[in-house]
Image (spheres, rainbow, N blue to C red):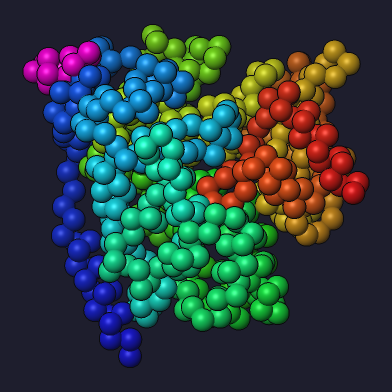
Amino acid sequence: MPVIGELIKKAIELGDKLNWESSAKDMQEGVLKQLLKKGKETSFGKYYGFEQILEADEPGLAFQQEVPYFDYDKIYSEWWCQIRKGHEDITWPGLNRYFAVSSGTTSASKYIPVTDDLLDSIRKTGIGQIMSLSKYDLPADFFQRQVMMLGSSTDLKENEGFLEGEISGISAYHIPKWFQNFYKPGPEISSISDWDERITAIAKNAKDWDIGGISGIPSWIELMMKKVIEYNKVTNIHEIWPNLTVYTPGGVAFEPHRKSFERLLAHPLTYIDTYLASEGFLAFQSRPDTDSMALVLDNGIYFEFVPFTSDNMTESGAVHPEAKALTIDQVEENVDYILLISTVAGAWRYMIGDTVMFTDKEKAEIKITGRTKFFLNVVGSQLSVHQMDEGLEALQEKFEVTIPEYTVSAIQENGVYIHRWYLGKDSGTVDEKAAAHFLDSTLQQLNKNYKVARSKALHAVEVIVVPANTFYAYSEKQKKKGGQIKFPRVMKEHDFRAWEAFASAHTES
């Protein structure tokens, strides 16, 4: 009888029942006031009149009227660069010790301030996610098992007086002592900077661990499991970790990876999605009967939503200054929104770069539908990453192949535009022309704008199939391997040409 596990499970169930809920609107209004009060003495708060905003009859409306939208380039050049110079009280009280370095899938790496308040927020949301596990039908002994958290290295680098790393590495660096007995691969292995060395160390020690849950980006989790299976000469990961029950992916949609992922298992897992970005822990799947995630509305992050239309975007890809932002009570279901956040790290009306869609407004549940810079819309096709993922899922089922990675670009050849897809195949076989026809037909059914584009400006659709490891090799060449790295689903033509040259050479070699 797993007595300790039973006690932990009961405590989680009790904690979840005691988690009283306010309305989404009330929670968000409360968060905004807390942020404004904490930030009113900062340089940013004084410049934009936070004290006067707090005194307004409708602080939320006054906040929108007085504070402009910011993308990363704007807020860094105008404000965060002053933090890097050692100035205090710039966009948040004090001087943060850490900067999260983003993976830079759409541009050069970004340096995002990580405050102690943000780390507290991430920890609290993590506890909230643990509490939600009481809603899942998990065995009591699951709560005694260890958790494999495969993020970035915890070996943070000192730069200009700050410690830098990816947010998963910074968070793991601060894992509380009470959790360290459960946490794997543990601080020593997690501090190994080289990805391949870290995975080899995990493979060597894997048989000594009792892993019940794993978390991390699907593509890198797959590579880790393959290494463990290969090193230990077994056929699936459950031969090493028989009690593996839960997987919490994050960063990208899991469904395109499901087929290749489950080939490494003896049986499927319970999948619980998360939304942890460099700017904060924004949402997680809080119940088993959905694949959407609930926004965290009461923990240091204020959300706004701008309808994702061409009129609301500038040519540079930022939110148009005149675009109207909506609050949590004003959104509608099944509409793509540009996500804006204001946070306890001193991000204000900040375009995080993701688009989301509400699937259940009452429960504040969303799906990530894509990246603002990853929308495929050169010729009016208006394809979201979410729709592209759906097309790839259908293709995998139709042709019985596993395609964990893909990328696509709208390119111009012989005076006309075409969509060229590269599919990273892990197993099975598929004819490229048949795949292109099926994918094209499926996307026309999913998106009427794409269907119109195919009858006018979009001349053709092409598919090129390459081994999935070609994608991982390109990431390594770009020095973007492991941890939180995500391969861009949509590339601009210039970047795509460089990728094509690499893929052709790698496939031929």
On the rendered image, what quadrant is the N terminus found in?
bottom left
> In the rendered view, would you say 303 is above or below 394?
above
Residue 275 lies in magenta, yes or no? no
Q: Position of residue 292 (x, y in %)?
A: 43, 48
Determine the image quadrant of residue 49.
top left
Determine the image quadrant of residue 485.
top right
Residue 50 lies in magenta, yes or no? yes
Residue toward you, 328 or 149: 149
The answer to whether any part of residue 448 appears in the image is no
Residue appearing at x 43%, y 64% in the figure:
187
Relative side of 63 to 420, left or right: left
Residue appearing at x 39%, y 56% in the figure:
172
What secondary structure is the magenta-colored segment mainly?
A: helix
> In the rendered view, would you say 378 is above or below 470?
above
Q: Position of residue 270 (x, y in %)?
A: 48, 65
Q: Position of residue 157 (x, y in %)?
A: 46, 45
> In the rendered view, would you say 403 is above or below 371?
below
Relative side of 124 to 166, left or right: left
Relative side of 174 to 38, left or right: right
Q: Which residues are drawn in magenta?
A: 46-57
